[in-house]
């Protein structure tokens, strides 16, 4: 395992603090999400319509919008000044109010199995984790992107759920996680032949993406734009705990692949494991899945199912699941439970997981097992955030010891 702690300068933070990482006091009260310390706005994360508005207010044509879009999302430029075929005058004008940047990379870790995890710090000091999971057999893989810092939901088996929601990520903060991954693998400009190591996006990082739906929608529309990052909707999967009204919207407005964190075959058990089920019970959730656009003729919905020993892992649970999902074009994905300190649960033994998969198969459903990746760097499902909180805590402790005046904690809720 390599473990490189770095702090790169996005141009937003003085380079004199970047070498040791900005301190807590560097952030507090100085910048808001999506803005630099000096109040300028990040061009990354603006929709095409917003960019068009900005440029037309400066008297620029639609062609210029295309050029700027291409620089940012096809060529991955990291500064306005780098857009060399745009006139110096326009670049200078844009630089007065805008910037193009990247989050500061505060940790960069590679697992023994090549899973790669980055801890990214945004302008207000909040951090989120992003993970690249290369395919074991092919030269491609998925970037797992976070949508929130923390989570409002409290699923009992999930470590992220034990931490309060700090805030939603902006569209720029969501898409820039993928862009940092591309920087790291040198995949700019967007490979025209479609062969890329970073081939897929999964919204399976920290947070509930459908509780930050609008920002996620803007970010994914940017990802899908054929003149930029150009990842097709078939290569994007959004995972949700089951926010029914937004499932319907996401289907209509984005049409990306859908994964449902199901984890129980009946309301009683699901209420216990996932409190959101009390608001949107299984009947409503299954109806939303049945109506999810495009599922009958294309990709099946993925039903994610965490294997918890003695809780939801018996053959009768598997048979009840098969009944529950009748009429939904879906497959299961069995996730061995990743334990975290203080968790109440144990993982089902491998033999039990295989038996459970076989029972689902006998009932007509595919049920591959998602063997954990990147466990050594805490990048596996349900482990995200714990590490960054630990890192943040230890940094804060170290600084508190260093600094004579104790800094306020960074928990900048919006
Ligand atoms: N909030 C979204 C996105 C998170 S995706 C959602 O819940 O769908 C991460 C997946 O890992 C979800 O299916 C989640 O239920 C699952 N998960 C959470 N904690 C886990 C743990 N400790 N072990 C294994 N899987 C876990
Ligand atoms: Fe939030 Fe998803 Fe974890 Fe539930 S499983 S607490 S929704 S991140």
Image (cartoon, grey):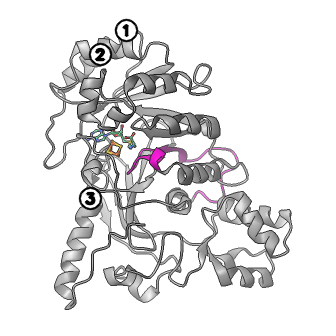
Q: Based on the displayed image, in which of its 4 quarters is residue 48 positioned?
A: bottom right
First in sequence: mark 1 or mark 2? 2
Classify mark 2: helix, strand or loop. Answer: helix
Q: Residue at x 56, y 81 (%)?
A: 39
Image quarter where the C terminus lies is: bottom left
Confirm or deny contact between disc 1 and disc 3 (CB under 8 A). Answer: no
Q: Which residues are magenta?
A: 187-211
User: Residue 387: x, y in percent?
Assistant: 26, 58
First in sequence: mark 1 or mark 3? 1
Confirm or deny contact between disc 1 and disc 2 (CB under 8 A). Answer: yes
Along the line of sight, the residue nearer the viewer: 77 or 112: 77
Confirm or deny contact between disc 3 and disc 2 (CB under 8 A). Answer: no
Classify mark 1: helix, strand or loop. Answer: loop
Q: Residue at x 77, y 64 (%)?
A: 52
First in sequence: mark 3 or mark 2? 2
User: Residue 375: x, y in percent?
Assistant: 27, 47
Q: Is residue 302 left or right of residue 249?
A: left
Residue indicated by mark 1: 363
Residue indicated by mark 2: 318
Q: Residue at x 73, y 53 (%)?
A: 227
Q: Residue at x 78, y 64 (%)?
A: 65
Q: Mark 3 packing: few (<14 Cα in 10 Å), some, or many (20+)?
A: some
Q: Looking at mark 1, is its residue's CB closer than 8 Å to ligand 1?
A: no
User: Residue 116: x, y in percent?
Assistant: 39, 54
Image quarter where the N terminus lies is: bottom left
Along the line of sight, the residue nearer the viewer: 198 or 217: 217
Is residue 327 among what the camera can see? yes
- What is the residue that sits farthest to the top in this orientation? 362
Q: Is residue 172 left or right of residue 72?
A: left
* Residue 387 image label: 3
Q: Mark 1 packing: few (<14 Cα in 10 Å), some, or many (20+)?
A: some
């Amino acid at each position: 395992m390599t473990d490189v702690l770095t702090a790169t300068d996005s141009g937003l933070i003085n380079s004199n603090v970047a070498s040791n990482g900005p301190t807590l006091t560097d952030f507090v009260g100085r910048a808001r999400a999506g803005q630099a310390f000096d109040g300028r706005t990040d061009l990354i994360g603006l929709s095409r319509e917003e960019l068009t508005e900005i440029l037309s207010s400066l008297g620029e044509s639609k062609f210029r919008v295309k050029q700027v879009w291409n620089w940012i999302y096809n060529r991955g430029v990291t500064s306005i000044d780098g857009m060399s075929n745009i006139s110096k005058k326009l670049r200078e004008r844009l630089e007065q109010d805008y910037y193009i940047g990247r989050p500061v990379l505060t940790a960069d870790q590679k697992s023994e199995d090549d899973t790669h995890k980055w801890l990214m710090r945004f302008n207000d000091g909040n951090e989120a984790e992003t993970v690249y999971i290369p395919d074991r057999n092919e030269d491609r893989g998925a970037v797992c992107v976070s949508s929130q810092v923390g989570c409002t939901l409290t699923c009992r088996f999930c470590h992220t759920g034990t931490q309060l929601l700090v805030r939603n990520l902006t569209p720029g903060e969501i898409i820039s996680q993928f862009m940092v991954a591309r920087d790291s693998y040198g995949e700019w400009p967007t490979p025209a032949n479609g062969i890329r190591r970073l081939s897929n996006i999964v919204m399976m990082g920290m947070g509930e993406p459908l509780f930050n739906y609008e920002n996620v929608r803007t970010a994914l529309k940017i990802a899908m734009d054929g003149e930029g990052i150009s990842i097709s909707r078939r290569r994007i999967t959004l995972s949700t705990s089951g926010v029914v009204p937004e499932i319907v919207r996401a289907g209509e407005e984005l049409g990306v692949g859908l994964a449902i964190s199901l984890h129980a075959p009946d309301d009683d058990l699901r209420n216990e494991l996932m409190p959101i089920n009390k608001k949107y019970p299984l009947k409503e959730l299954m109806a939303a899945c049945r109506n999810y656009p495009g599922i009958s003729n294309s990709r099946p919905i993925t039903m994610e199912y965490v294997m918890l020993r003695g809780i939801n892992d018996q053959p009768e649970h598997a048979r009840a699941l098969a009944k529950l999902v009748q009429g939904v074009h879906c497959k299961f994905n069995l996730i061995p439970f990743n334990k975290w300190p203080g968790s109440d649960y144990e993982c089902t033994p491998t033999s039990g997981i295989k038996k459970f998969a076989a029972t689902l198969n006998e009932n007509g459903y595919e049920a591959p097992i998602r063997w954990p990746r990147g466990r050594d760097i805490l990048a596996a499902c349900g482990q995200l955030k714990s590490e960054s909180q630990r890192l943040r805590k230890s940094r804060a402790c170290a600084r508190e010891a260093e600094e004579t005046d104790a800094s306020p904690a960074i928990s900048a809720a919006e």
